[in-house]
Amino acid sequence: LLTVCLQLPGKKDLFIEADLMSPLDRIASVSILKQHEVDKLYKVENKPVLSSSEQLCFLVRPRIKNMRYIANLVNADKLAGRTRKYKVIFSPQKFYACEMVLEEEGIYGDVSCDEWAFSLLPLDVDLLSMELPEFFRDYFLEGDQRWINTVAQALHLLSTLYGPFPNCYGIGRCAKMSHELWRNLEEEEDSETKGRKPEIGHLFLLDRDVDFVTALCSQVVYEGLVDDTFRIKCGSVDFGPEVTSSDKSLKVLLNAEDKVFHEIRNEHFSNVFGFLSQKARNLQAQYDRRRGMDIKQMKNFVSQELKGLKQEHRLLSLHIGACESIMKKKTKQDFQELIKTEHALLEGFSIRDSTSYIEEHIDRQVSPIESLRLMCLLSITENGLIPKDYRSLKTQYLQSYGPEHLLTFSNLRRAGLLTEQAPGDTLTAVESKVSKLVTDKAAGKITDAFSSLAKRSNFRAISKKLNLIPRVDGEYDLKVPRDMAYVFSGAYVPLSCRVIEQVLERRSWQGLDEVLRLLNCSELAFTGGTKDDKAPSESLRLILVVFLGGCTFSEISALRFLGREKGFRFIFLTTAVTNSARLMEAMSEVKA
């Protein structure tokens, strides 16, 4: 990027699109940009531009609205008789449609175009992100396939760095297309990886729509809760005054270098307070050691240990502050009741009570995004809502939160997140007559019983087939988890993670035909790879999992746990880190 900037020698102003600011900040700070003669930084937004520089540089996503923005600016300069140099840098790649717009607007000859092929941002030792949050909406709602090339390029880059992947597995339409496009790229540039020893033994591609349920659940591991509560952006989080116990906010980088965070990130929230208080006691004991020291020991202590202890102390107080803030917010929202409802939906019990809870949630106007999420979870776990419930919930929602949400319902329906069962899926005429004879309360129960028989819900069937709801005798011990279900308090094993586990055990999709049929992916599961018999055994322990459409911190924690149990090491590549609120916002037509 900086070399591209240098192609405009001399002082220049840089216009950056909002969602490229965080990734750019991770790579090049403002001071580095200043060294490369970037004078002022502006955000690309619908405001008049007051730049006096003779050279303007635009760092943008390849979107039509951005081209219009640049065209308006250049044409305004032309009208005013100003001549300046303009450079447009597209990230991660340039699209033909954008050049067409520049041509239509009559400024194609006035600007020079370039690409910043930025497709992989290392957020942590085992997590790479493409930072393409729009991938989910573009592909899974609009059916726009333009980012698939970007995914293929990212895989190609990884294979040139780490050698070929001996075993490839994938599930989902997008996964299949990305894999094919990537294979084509490999064949075109055959020589690069030939004869290289593979360093990563398995590659697994997975579409987000294979498992919406996991992404819609409330997270209860520490890192997931921090993301749900404060929003982790590009690997860092802004802790407000309520966490820092000062009057300032603080931007904190959350990764394995933060020793305190590293130890609690994958823990269930109920264990975190205990761990932090133990850590505080240990820290105090280390501070107290200095009491009986002579001068030489004191000198060593100050030069070698004190700085580390102070740093740890600072991080510890931050995470304790974050925990207290999360506790306050969750107590206010009655988190326990919410989790109970989610677990009931996952297990398929007392659906009537859950529906009443969702209605109350809507009527109390708790939060438009949260209410939508619960409706989607109800719809997916029940394989669609019965028309009566669908109409009633939708009407209440629109009356409570406003009619402008109407288009959102259409989006959710198209994406398969909130659907209505076809009349044939529900009760027969006889069953409805029987239920009319019985009192309403009991009718609800009978209706539930009949409808659960009538509509062979895929989620229920998949859940049974893959044993996603663990049968536990007594309490589930969250301190010493026995399986991946701990990331949802022992109530549910993430479907995406279970699929990955099953395929890795079998080294193929064999024996999973029924699961694929239920996931509607019979045609969309594949295996491939170079089938290298000489692959070093340590490489076979390393698995690259690619989530197309985003993955959650809960899934990452679950797979890290699986890795520890089975002796694997997982590396994650995702189009962006997501959570339930981000999914709902991507589908929403009402901008917050």
Image (cartoon, rainbow, N blue to C red):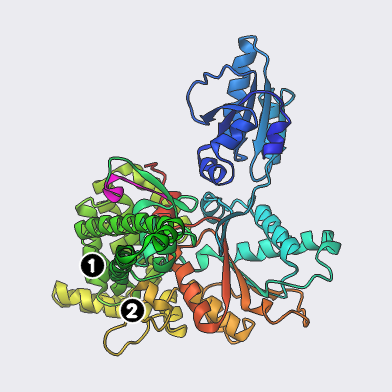
Q: Which residues are magenta?
A: 237-245
Q: Amino acid at mark 2?
A: Lys
Q: Viewed as shown, does residue 132 lie left or right of 83?
A: left
Residue 164's label in the rendered image is none
Residue 517 visible in the current orientation:
no
Q: Earlier in the sequence, mark 1 or mark 2?
A: 1
In the image, taking residue 318 as reference, residue 458 lies left or right, namely: right
Q: Residues within 10 Å of mark 2 (few under 14, many from 20)?
A: few
Q: Quadrant of residue 449?
A: bottom left
Rendered image quadrant of residue 491: bottom left
Rendered residue at 47%/56% (across/down): 414
Please tell me which residue is depicted at 38% across the width and 59% down the height of the picture.
295
- Assess disc 1: are there few (<14), some (14-19) or many (≥20) residues with their C-alpha within 10 Å of its C-alpha: few
User: Of 179 and 130, which appears nearest the observer?
Assistant: 130
Q: Residue at x 66, y 79 (%)?
A: 540
Q: Where is 201 relative to 295, above or below?
A: below
Query: What secondary structure is found at the residue carrying circle 1?
Result: helix
Q: Position of residue 92 (x, y in %)?
A: 65, 46
Judging by the rendered image, the residue that carries numbered circle 1 is 336
Give coordinates of residue 529: x percent, y percent. Answer: 73, 73
Distance between the alpha carbons at the discs numbered 1 and 2: 19 Å
The residue mark sitting in front, 1 or 2, is: 2
Identify the residue at the far front of this view.
Answer: 295
Residue 479 disc label? 2
Pick the quarter of the image with the N terminus.
top right
Residue 194 within the segment the image draws in magenta: no
